[in-house]
Image (cartoon, rainbow, N blue to C red):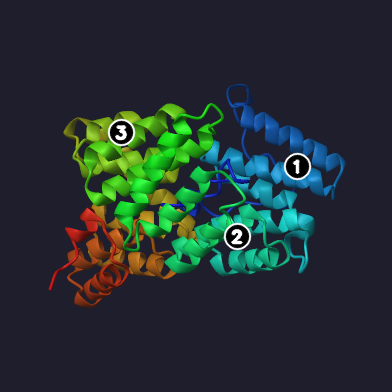
Amino acid sequence: MRAFGWRIWLLVPLLLSAAAFGAPYVPADDGAVLERLPERIDPSLRDVKRLRAALDRSPGDLALATTLARRAIEAARETGDPRFLGQAQAALAPWWSSADPPAPALLLRATLKQSTHDFAGALADLDRLIATHPNDGQALLTRATVLTVQGRYKEARADCTRIARLTLPLVVIACDAAPASVSGDATSAYRALTGTIADAARSASANAAVVEWAQTLAGEIAQRRGDAPAAEAHFNAALELDPRDPYLLAAYADFLLDHDRPAEAVRLLKDNTRNDILLLRLTLAEARLPEMRAAFAAHRADLRDRFDAARRRGDTLHQREEARYTLEIAGDATRALELARANWKVQRESADLRILVAAAKAANDPAALRETEDWVRTHSLEDVSIAALVPTR
C-alpha cells in the first residue's frame, strides 16, 4: 500500500507497507544462510540477529518473540529487505495458525497479513482483537490503514475517531487525513494536518518518526491538490528527519518524475537499487536521460527479471509496480491494463487508480475508463494527475 501503509507502528513508530515488499520468505531450516549482511554498518541487522539467537534459546517466549517480530518489521522498513518479514513471521510461528493467540501475537500477525495483501485475514484478526480490547489504539490504527487501502473511507475514519483519546494528536489527525483526503475532504484534511504538524514542531517532545510520517502524507496531499511548492517543502522536511525511508523516497521520486526532473530522481535513488519499488523509479528516471542509456538498459533487465521471478513464485504483491513497468518501460498497454485491473481488485489507493486509468487510456478501453471516472465522481477524489487522465462528460 502507498498512501497510509508502512507508516505508524505501536502508535508512534511505523506500520508495514505492502507496496514496498514482497511476500516474506520463511526458511524451512533455521540454520539456512540467506546472505552475509553488513552488520557493522546497519545496527538493525545486529539487533535482529541478537534477538533471533535469544529466541532460539527460549522458544515459545511470547515477550521475546514479539520483540523480535517488531524489530524485524522495523528492519524491513529501514533496509527495504523483505526477508526481515520472514524473520518476523518465523518468530510468531507458535501462534501463526492459532485460533486464539495472545493479543500481542494477534496484532503482529494482522500486521504481517496486511503486508502480504491478505486484507481479509488481517481484518479478521483485527476485528477479533478490537472486540476484546476496544481501546487498543494500535489495532484501531492498523484497521484504519487496511480499510483506507480498500477504499472503505467512512469506516476508516470511524476508527481514527476512536483513537482520539489513546494517542498523540498528530497521529489522530494524520490517521483521518489519509482517508479524508481521497474522499472529498482534501482541503480540510490538509489544513488540519499542516496545522497539527506546526503544533508538533513547537513541542520539545515531538516524535520525529510521527512528524516524518505526517510530513510525507502532507506532501502527498499537496501533490494531489496540485500545490507543487508545498508538496516539495513537505517532502524535504520529511527527508531531513529520515533520509532513508523507502516510502518517502518513492513518494518524492514520483513527485520529481511528475515534474520532469529525472536527474534529481536519479541522484535521490542511485544507491537504493535493492528495493524493487525504488529501482522502478530510478529506471523510469534513467529512461528520460540519454546519457544514462547503459544504466537504464541494465536496470530495465534487472526489473524484468525480478518481476518474472515474482510471477514464478506466485507473488502478486507488486502488480501496481509491474503494471507501471509494463506500460511505461515495456510499452505493452494491454498487459499493463490486465495487471492494473488485477491490482485494483486488491487495493484502491490513488496510485492504483492512476495506473489503471493510464493503462486504460493507452489500451483504448472505454469500460475501464468509465470505471475510473465513476470512482472519481463517487468519492469526490481530488487528484490533479488523475484528473488530467480521466475523461470528462
The local secondary structure at tag 2 comes to helix
Measure the C-alpha gap from mark 2 to mark 1.
25 Å
**Which numbered disc, 3 or 2, marks the residue that appears first in the sequence?**
2
Measure the C-alpha gap from mark 3 to mark 1.
47 Å
> Tags 2 and 1 in contact by the CB under 8 Å rule?
no
Under mark 3, the amino acid is: Ala
Report the residue that reaches farthest toward the top: 40
Under mark 1, the amino acid is: Gly
Rate crowding at label 2 as few (under 14), some (14 to 19) or many (20 or more) other CA atoms within 10 Å.
Answer: many
For the point 34% across and 36% down, the residue is: 234
Which mark, by number, is residue 342?
none
Measure the C-alpha gap from mark 3 to mark 2.
34 Å
In this rendering, position of residue 348 left or right of residue 85: left
Q: Quadrant of the C terminus?
A: bottom left
- The residue wearing badge 1 is 31
Give the foreground label among 2 and 1: 2
- The residue wearing badge 2 is 113
Rate crowding at label 1 as few (under 14), some (14 to 19) or many (20 or more) other CA atoms within 10 Å.
Answer: few
In this rendering, position of residue 72 left or right of residue 381: right
On the image, the x and y values in percent for residue 80 come to 51, 40
Give the foreground label among 3 and 2: 3
In this rendering, position of residue 28 left or right of residue 35: right
* In front of the other: 216 or 131: 131
* In front of the other: 1 or 11: 11
* In front of the other: 327 or 244: 244
On the image, the x and y values in percent for residue 209 come to 52, 36
The local secondary structure at tag 1 comes to loop
Can you say whether 380 is above or below 172 in the image? below
In this rendering, position of residue 31 left or right of residue 225: right
Rate crowding at label 3 as few (under 14), some (14 to 19) or many (20 or more) other CA atoms within 10 Å.
Answer: some
- The residue wearing badge 3 is 233
Residue 273: in sight, yes or no?
Answer: no
